[in-house]
Structures are given as structure tokens and as C-alpha cells.
Amino acid sequence: MKKGFYNRHSQPQAGAAAQGFALFERAAREVPLDDLVEVADLACFHGGNSMEPMRRAACILRERSPGASIEVTHTDLPTNDFNPVFELLSGPDSYLGPGVRASVRAGSFYQPLFRQASQSLIWCSAATHWLSRVPAPAHPTYAAQWSEQARQDWQAWIDSRAEELRPGGQLVMVGSGADSFGRTGAEGLVTMVRDTMAEVLGPRQKGRLALPTYHRTLREWLAPLGPKLTLKEVLEPPMPEPYWEEYQQTGNLETYVDRVVSFAIAALNQPLLKRQGGKELERRLRQRVQAHPDLARPRWWLIVLRLERV
């Protein structure tokens, strides 16, 4: 993926994250403070959608305790390129300032990333639909295996955050979920992408086309909270649609297709597509989106949770 590509083509993820800002600000106003306040940003990727929530939290924490030292840690997988994060932190969009420092840490958020009871605030957006692995082929026959993998991963995520948060610490998670019938709202775009991948990569690659994603229902999100985390707030807001709204205002189909296809490629970030067929996949996906622009609207069902460590 070209430098800065994801940050330039992740407006829907930015809009989704914004649905959690108010909850994150409330959390920042409520958590207990010491001389050192540690804040975690989980699954930052290239950092484009991390600067604003961290800025909001840092401002509130500085207002509450002007003399406190605030340490923000951005995390992602060891394979992530953290250079764009460092560039943002040194640029005009940075939240850094007096008493506010930042670092990065590599590791999976399906295990603890910080020492026990160290974090006052944790933020995570547009990431928990990614599973730790592909459990089975992407076929209804294997639905139970996918559901069980999602259950295990989410339990591991919750247990890890419960260990990391200090008593009274809070987390806000903005996730891509599903309604009570299992509908994500973006079936059209996902089907277009999968059909295009199957065409481009050929029948021998079909077994590798399963994306390790799962969209949980509200019941699945809330099931594993356990005794250490308590639910403060839960929202199910609509997914912002910046590309579709722009298209409705301008009528410019070419621009809409460009934005949706770039968003899909950036969101998938699949190494297989980089090695072979990337240009052809983009060309064919553009044809599909142009033929059916309404079906390509990325309208994921969102969930926003605010949890507190008891």
C-alpha cells in the first residue's frame, strides 16, 4: 500500500470513530488521575484516525490535572508500518504538547499489551471485526466455526483490557457489527469485492479468499464482559456515508467510484492483492461499483461501547 494511502481513503472509518468521541470525552472526565496518566490507542494502523480522539482526551486530562504527565501509546501488529504515525505526530495534526508524550508498541490486541492495572484510558476503533485468524472456509457450512472464533477472540480482547485497565479506568470501543439478523449493512460492497477477487485470482486461489473478519451482534458484543468490566454506555449509531452524500449532492459518479474503490482496497489491506492482480482487481471492481453504485454503499452497522474497570 502506497505511503499515506489508507489515511487518505479512510473517511468512513473516521466518521465511524467520531461516533465514539463523546463517550471517550466523558470517560476522560471520569477516570482517576495520578501524576502519570497512561492512554492506549489500540490498532492505530497508519494513525490518520487516531490524532483527533487522542487530542480530545489529552485536552480534557490536561484541564483536569495540569501537572500530570500524559503518555499515549499507539499499538498495532508487528507487521504494521508505524512511520506514518511518527510523521503525523511531528506534523500540524499532532496532539503532542507540554506534558503529553507518545510512543508506539507492536503486538496483537488479543493479548495484554501493557502491564497490569496501568492504563487509565483505552481507545479502539474500526478494528475488532478483524479476527486473529481465518477459522474455516468462507461458506455457510462453517458458520459455527466462524462464530466460535469470534467468541474466543472477543473474550481474549475483553480479558486483556480488564487486566490492563486500572480500577476506575475506562475504554471506548467503536466496532463494525451486525443487527439481530446478522446483517452488516455492507453486504453489497463485500460481495462485489469477493466476486472480483475470485475472478482476478482464479479458482486455485479461491480457498485463500476468506477474509478474517466477523461482524458481531449486540448480544455477542456484550456476552463476555464478566465481573471486571461494567457497561457504562452502549450506542448503535448509523454509519456515516460521506461518499454517498457527496455523490447525491454532486451527481459525480466517477468521483464516487474512485472513493469507494480506494476505500475498499485500503480497508482490506490484503498482501495477496499487492502481490498479484491488484490493478486488474481495481479495474473490475470499478466496473461493478459503477454499474450498481447504490449496492456499493458501505453502510456498516456500528456499535459503540464504554466500559469501566471495577
Image: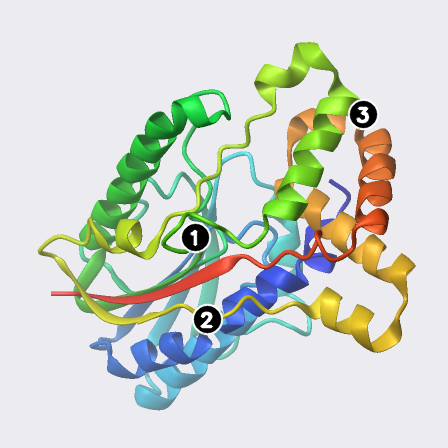
Per the model, the C-alpha gap separating discs 1 and 3 is 30 Å
Residue 245 placement (x, y as % from top left):
73, 72
- Can residue 4 be seen? no
Decide: few, some or many residues near mark 2? Use Cα within 10 Å; few <14, some 14-19, many ≥20. Answer: few
Q: Residue furthest front?
A: 181
Q: Dot 2: what SS?
A: loop
Q: Residue at x 63, y 17 (%)?
A: 206
Q: Residue 237's mark?
A: 2
- Pointer 1 or 3: first along the chain: 1
Label 3 CA crowd tier, 10 Å (few <14, some 14–19, many 20+)? some
Q: Nearer the viewer, residue 120 or 303?
A: 303
Quarter of the N terminus within the rendering? top right
Q: Amino acid at mark 2?
A: Pro
Residue visible at 41% across and 56% down in the picture: 179
Residue 124 appears left or right of 245: left
Of residues 298 and 101, which is closer to you in this image? 298
Q: Give the Cα distance between marks 2 and 3.
A: 36 Å
Q: Which numbered marker is on residue 178?
A: 1
Q: Nearer the viewer, mark 1 or mark 3?
A: 1
Dot 3 corresponds to which residue?
277
Secondary structure, mark 1, is loop
In the rendered structure, which amino acid carries the disc numbered 1? Ala
57 in relation to 172, above or below: below
Q: Where 292 falls versus 125 (above or below)? A: above
